[in-house]
């Protein structure tokens, strides 16, 4: 993974860490057509974020304990 991609994964996890987000908002905000920028997929594959059912709202995305640790390791509180 490149430094650019790592930095974007960190930004995504930090953004979600501020407050859980609806899956539709995450995908709309972080969508990319570039096959080399798999930010969402990288965050999910690394276990930094998780999808959870949200009653009447669809699916909510929140950071995991691994995601919180990732933020702390990079000086960004979770």
Image: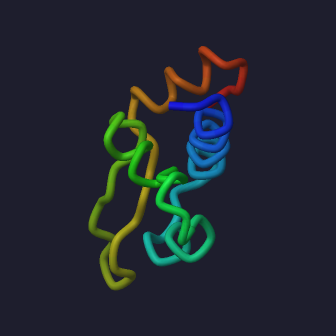
Q: Quadrant of the C terminus?
A: top right
Q: Position of residue 28 (x, y in %)?
A: 56, 77
Coloration mode: rainbow
Residue closest to the eye, 66 or 7? 7
Residue at 54%, 53% (x, y): give it: 37
Quarter holding residue 55: bottom left
Is 36 rendered above or below residue 45? below
Q: Position of residue 11 (x, y in %)?
A: 67, 43
Of 12 and 52, nearer the camera is: 12
Q: Nearer the viewer, residue 42 or 63?
A: 42
Q: Position of residue 13 (x, y in %)?
A: 56, 43
Q: Which residue sits furthest top?
A: 73
Residue closest to the far bottom: 56
Q: Nearer the viewer, residue 55 or 41?
A: 41
Residue plotted at (50% across, 21% down): 69
Up/down of 20 relative to 8, above or below: below
Q: Residue at x 59, y 54 (%)?
A: 19
Where is residue 35? Give x, y as percent: 47, 60
Taking the spot 60% from the left edge, 14% from the top edge, the residue there is 73
Q: In the picture provided, is 63 more to the left or to the right than 37? A: left
């Amino acid at each position: 993974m490149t430094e650019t991609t790592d930095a974007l994964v960190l930004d995504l996890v930090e953004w979600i860490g501020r407050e859980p987000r609806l899956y539709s908002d995450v995908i709309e905000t972080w969508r990319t057509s570039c096959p080399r920028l798999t930010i969402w997929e990288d965050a999910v594959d690394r276990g930094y974020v998780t999808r959870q059912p949200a009653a009447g709202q669809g699916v909510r995305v929140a950071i995991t304990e691994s995601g919180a640790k990732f933020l702390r390791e990079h000086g960004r509180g979770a």
